[in-house]
Amino acid sequence: MKKVAILIGLLLLSNLVISEAVAQRINFSTWTGSEDVSIRSIGSVISSLRFNEKQQVLLANTPAINIAKNDPQVAIFEIEAPSEFDITVELQAPNFLAKEGDPENGTIPFALQMSYSNQGLPNEMAALGSSMDVPLGFTSVTFPVHTGRRGVPLPPNPELYGNARPKSTVYLFVYGTLGPIGQVSAGNYVGEVLINVYVSGDD
């Protein structure tokens, strides 16, 4: 089993002052440990977890801000892997965003959820409507790369390598909730999210 790791640096810049604008920046960097797997963020400029688009100014003592999977602010990933295998997608995220430079004195609750589509649909918009939600509180899920495959994953065919191996595309949707925001001071609140993709049957 090989492991594909994607490190997502999530930086939420918020001064929590009503008279000043706030900003958010989400940085995506990817690394894959297998030539048979590729993964990329779709629309990293226009499609990422942008809580500031849901509420432009973040204030202390305000309700939670929610990004649903059908909101334009959802983060979308495209995973391409051999069609005959199963993959496990694991989402690791902090429970709180901590104040930069002073994590002991400022936190904002933070929770993520994910959905996936492995039906071989042509694009993320088509995949969204039929995507499967991973239950809230679960941080990993295992499923076939292509839903048309049945049974136990087959061993790799030694005659098929690289581009010759049939592949399918999985769409992963990541969304969630920031807050409720308590009695916190102005500052930058940061956290890191790690997505691991384990591809079985590719030793």
Image: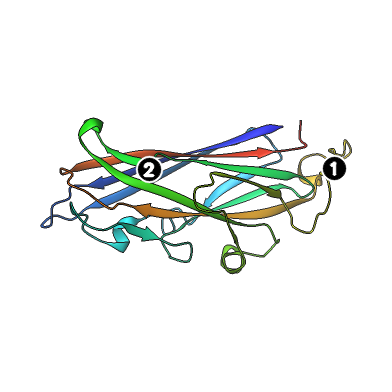
Is 116 displayed left or right of 2 in the figure? left
Residue 33: quadrant of the picture? top right
| Residue depicted at x 69% and y 37% | 35
Which mark is drawn over residue 71?
A: none
Local crowd size for mark 2, using a 10 Å CA cut-off: few (<14), some (14–19), many (≥20): many
**Which residue is located at x 41 percent, y 48 percent?**
111
Label 1 environment density (alpha carbons within 10 Å; few <14, some 14–19, many ≥20): few
Horizontal side, residue 86 vs residue 171: left or right:
right
**Quarter containing the N terminus:** top right
Dividing the picture into quadrants, the one containing residue 68 is bottom left
Q: Is residue 162 left or right of residue 49?
A: right
Task: Please give the residue where the numbered disc 2 appears in the rendered image.
Answer: 10
For numbered disc 1, what is the local secondary structure?
loop
Q: Is 35 placed above or below 108 here?
A: above
Q: Quadrant of the C terminus?
A: top right
Q: Position of residue 104 (x, y in %)?
A: 23, 31
For badge 2, the amino acid type reads Leu
Looking at the image, what colour scheme do you see?
A: rainbow
Residue 183 location (% of width, % of height): 17, 46
Give the CA distance from mark 2 to mark 1.
Answer: 37 Å
Do tag 2 and tag 1 residues touch (Cβ < 8 Å)?
A: no
| Residue 164, picture quadrant | top right
As shown in the figure, which amino acid type bears the numbered disc 1? Answer: Leu
Residues 164 and 72: in front is 72
Which of the two labelled residues, at mark 2 and mark 1, occupies the earlier sequence position? 2
The reply, left or right, for residue 118 in relation to residue 47 is right
Looking at the image, which residue sits at the far left?
19
Secondary structure of the residue carrying numbered label 2: strand
Q: Residue at x 26, y 58 (%)?
A: 63
Instruction: Report the residue marked by disc 1.
Output: 154
Residue 189 placement (x, y as % from top left): 27, 41
- Percent position (x, y) of residue 150? 82, 54
